[in-house]
Amino acid sequence: YYQEGPFRVYTNFGGEGSPFEGFDFGGFSDPFEIFEQFFGFQSPFSRGRRQHRRDVYETSLTFEEAVNGVKKDVVIKGDRKTIKIPAGVDEGMKIRFSDFDLLIHVKPHPYFRREGQDIYFGKEISYSLAVLGGVVEVPTINGTVKLKVRSGTQSGTTVKLRDQGIPYPQTYRKGDQYVVFKINTPSRVSSKAKRILEELEKEI
């Protein structure tokens, strides 16, 4: 045994192997694993246990590379390797390989906002278009699409474009894109426009 503060810790019971052989710890190999699982750090009494640490490397992707997948050159243990990264990965994801992990960082997009596999895009429309309705063009990760604006659209109205989002890694599923309309109210209007709006106000 050895002394750990006020505690006497026995390393074996007169023979080889673990002192906990024959005990049932509910799927854990010993009580130290239970301690680490529930308290999130290593038990102070497990200093003799061998810990296997995996090497973690990092790579940075553009938004488009994360969406579509890409092959990246990464230096692993001093050697440059080409690694295939699947479509749909996100910031903070780890890809596990046989003897190391690859931590993914994704640069933000200038106008797309990502939440999981869904994409959000804010589209400004004019006041007249919101009132009268019409058609606008909206960018997606798959190209530009035309979207109908219903008459009477309010600021904050959200339209879902099904399957226009980001692929789920290693599957055929995709997220959706959400278009959030924002009404662009002019800060200045001409006298003629003001009279028209006043007449419109009386009608509605």
Image: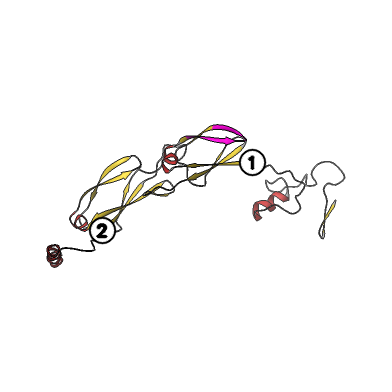
Q: Residue at x 15, y 66 (%)?
A: 201
Q: Residue at x 47, y 36 (%)?
A: 86
Q: Nearer the viewer, residue 156 or 105?
A: 105
Residue 102 screen position, x and y as percent: 56, 40
Q: Nearer the viewer, residue 159 or 141?
A: 141
Which residue corresponds to mark 1? 54
Main SS of the magenta part reads: strand
Mark 2 near mark 1, Cβ–Cβ under 8 Å?
no
State the SS at label 2.
strand
Q: Residue at x 26, y 58 (%)?
A: 183
How did the renderer colour the structure? secondary structure
The CA span between labels 2 and 1 is: 52 Å
The answer to whether residue 127 is above or below residue 145 is below
Residue 134 screen position, x and y as percent: 19, 50
Amino acid marked by disc 2: Asn
- Packing grade of label 1 (10 A; few <14, some 14-19, many >=20) is few
Q: Describe residue 82's horizontal placement relative to residue 180 as left or right.
A: right
Which residue corresponds to mark 2? 184
- Packing grade of label 2 (10 A; few <14, some 14-19, many >=20) is some
> Is residue 168 a member of the stretch shown in magenta?
no
> Is residue 75 a member of the stretch shown in magenta?
yes
Quadrant assignment, res 172: top left
Q: Which mark is residue 22?
A: none
Quadrant holding the C terminus: bottom left
State the SS at label 1.
loop
Q: Residue furthest right?
A: 14
Residue 166 screen position, x and y as percent: 40, 42
Q: Which residues are magenta?
A: 71-81
Q: Describe residue 45's horizontal placement relative to residue 69 as left or right.
A: right
Which of the marked residues, 2 or 1, is nearer the chain's N terminus?
Answer: 1
